[in-house]
Image (spheres, rainbow, N blue to C red):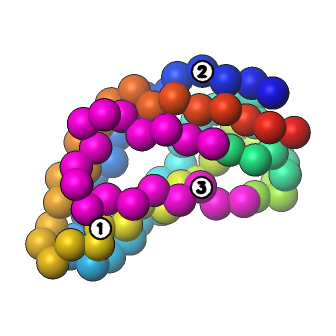
Amino acid sequence: MANGQVHVNLPSIGAQSCINRPVSIATRRGRDMLVLQPTGNLAEGIVIMPIFDVDDGGWFTIRACNITGSPVDALDGAWGYAVYR
C-alpha cells in the first residue's frame, strides 16, 4: 500500500455533467485500487469517482460530476490518497 497527498485542480463543471481528470500518483501500477479523499473545500454537489485502469503509468483518472442544476467551480486543493495492490 502507498499513501500520501496530491494536488488536484478541477475546473468549473457544467450543470448535471461530468469531466474526467488525470491525477498524478507516481507509485501507481496497472490494476491498483485507489481510495481518494477530496479536499475539505470541495464544492457541494460535486461527486468524485476513481476509474479502474489496467494500464501501467503514473496517472489515475477520476470522474468528477456536478449533480446540481447550475455550473459549479470545484476549486483546487490537497487530496489524500491510498493505493492498494
State how far apart marks 3 and 2 are (Cα). 16 Å
**Left or right of 29 on screen, residue 46:** left
Residue 10 in the magenta stretch? The answer is no
Give the percent coordinates (x, y) of residue 22: 53, 49
Can residue 60 be seen from the camera position used here? yes
Q: Which label was assigned to residue 79?
A: none
Give left or right: position of 80 versus 9: right
Tell me the distance, in whole angstroms, between the alpha carbons under discs 3 and 1: 15 Å
Quarter of the figure with residue 55: bottom right
**Residue 51 sits above or below residue 83 on the image:** below
- Sooner in the amino-acid sequence: mark 2 or mark 1: 2
The quarter in which the N terminus is drawn is top right
Determine which of the numbered discs, if any, sits on residue 50 in the image.
Answer: 3
Q: Which residues are magenta?
A: 35-52
Q: Secondary structure at mark 2?
A: strand
For the point 26% across and 62% down, the residue is: 45
Which secondary structure, mark 3? strand
Residue type, numbered disc 3: Pro
Q: Which residue is mark 2?
A: 4
Q: Quadrant of residue 27?
A: top right
Disc on the earlier residue, 3 or 2:
2
